[in-house]
Amino acid sequence: MAVVSALGSWYFRKRIGQLEEAASNAAETQRTVLRTLISSAEETEFGRLYEFHNIKTYDQFRQNVPLQDYESLKPYIERLMKGEQNILWHSDINWFAKSSGTTQDKSKFIPVSFESLEDCHFKGGKDILAWHFQNNPESKIFDGKSLLIGGSHKINTLAENSFYGDLSAVLMNNLPFWVNLIKTPNLSIALMDDWEMKLEKMALKTMNENVTNITGVPTWTLVLFDKLLELTGKKNITEIWPNLELYIHGGVSFAPYREQFKRYISNPGMRYLETYNASEGFFGIQTESDVHDMMLMTDYGIFYEFITMDTVHSENPVVLSLEEVKKDENYAVVISTNSGLWRYVLGDTISFTSLNPFRFTITGRTKLFINAFGEELVIENAEKAIAYACESSNSRVREYTAAPIYLDDPENAGHEWLIEFETIPENLDYFTSQLDKKLKEINSDYEAKRHKDIALKMPTVKSMPANTFYNWLKQKGKLGGQHKVPRLSNDRKIVNEILELI
């Protein structure tokens, strides 16, 4: 541990300087990234098809290479999964991050190259610690263990040397040796397919260890906390892990979970850092625990572009470089990566809070919204309104999803919210009114539709029994890992499936 700590301290000091330089020269850093990506992939099948050898500038890249989505790249990826190489990227692709998405059941298999592992995902993990040590010089993280709450791993049978799993499983199977010295639990537990059994074994394995930091999706971390308290008879996680100082999270907004974590963890020095780490790449890090936006990581082998939201679904969307974006505007993210995703429309939307350095918040997804009546309700609106309603009614929400109410009678049109409360409000009608009030405050389109109940009635909120969403995920075979409940849907498929369980 002492050797790891000493090496870490040296690396972190050096890396902070590099990060600050990359942030202050983000535009030039991105131009260098694009040149490197194009030159690296010139002789791939995709590179030859779009004549990468003739592309010298961003404008040429933007003009010559069409925007892609998973369906357009899927034929290439399927060939990679069967063992063909040099198709999208110059180095061999042997690993694929399986992503089930949030609005459909169909799985996606995202290629993960060696360069992506080393220069993106693992660099991101080290940079999280670099910022934590920069802000907390007395940190004792390396005096204990890192608890990684991940998913499961399966072998892809389409080729002898082709493997897949969810992102956390892919990363765990390729971790640097020094990480294995300080992480817990071991891979035999961390990669179990049976999530419920894994939770039990994970709790038994770690309850007597000195865990100083945790990485995981909030939902499953709370489930593990409950299991630990049940097994130990303790009332607080700090009683089990008194030296716990950092929780690294991502995948869903932390706002609905923040108060729950404070109830479980009484350490006043506890730090919470958000990351934007998707199957397609590692994009952002919250560099200060009390500032809730993230820094865009511009030197991870990913070139960024941004589609203006008013054109995102048009035939000719307006696509901007990092130099062309503005503050406080919603953009759909487009990436070109060192795993061979070229001008790939990610599906996430962000808004920049600062342009020097480039800092942002995640505002939602291009397909995760409710816009049945022109209200354009995005996930950021929902998260803020839920948090406000909870604070106003002294309640806590564990999980929720919402969808439109489509009825022939327009006077009954509205939104239906299915909410599983950890602390149920004394007056559900009051909670609903506060939710509606906040939505009107932060979304002018929603407010206009709600004006005098012309287009939308007051939302309907239904309190769900405990474990409703857990049981829905279990039924769908999506327990654990990065699987999560879709927060907003523009149809009623998910809401109706959940209601059928009640």
Image (cartoon, grey):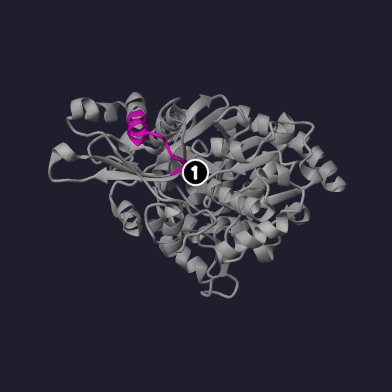
Please give the name of the residue rendered at 50% of the width and 47% of the height, measured from the top-left corner: 336
Q: Is residue 448 left or right of residue 177?
A: left
Q: Nearer the viewer, residue 228 or 89?
A: 228
Quarter assignment of residue 339: bottom right
> What amino acid is at disc 1?
Val
Q: Is residue 232 left or right of residue 349?
A: right
State whether residue 268 appears in this view: yes
Q: Nearer the viewer, residue 361 or 256?
A: 256
Q: Position of residue 276 (x, y in %)?
A: 55, 42
Please give the name of the residue rendered at 54% of the width and 74% of the height, measured from the top-left corner: 159
Q: Which residues are magenta?
A: 421-434
* Local SS, label 1: loop
Q: Quick one: quadrant of the C terminus?
A: bottom left
Q: Is residue 213 left or right of residue 479?
A: right
Q: Position of residue 141 (x, y in %)?
A: 76, 42
Q: Is residue 441 left or right of residue 294?
A: left
User: Magenta includes 429?
Assistant: yes
Residue that label 1 marks: 252
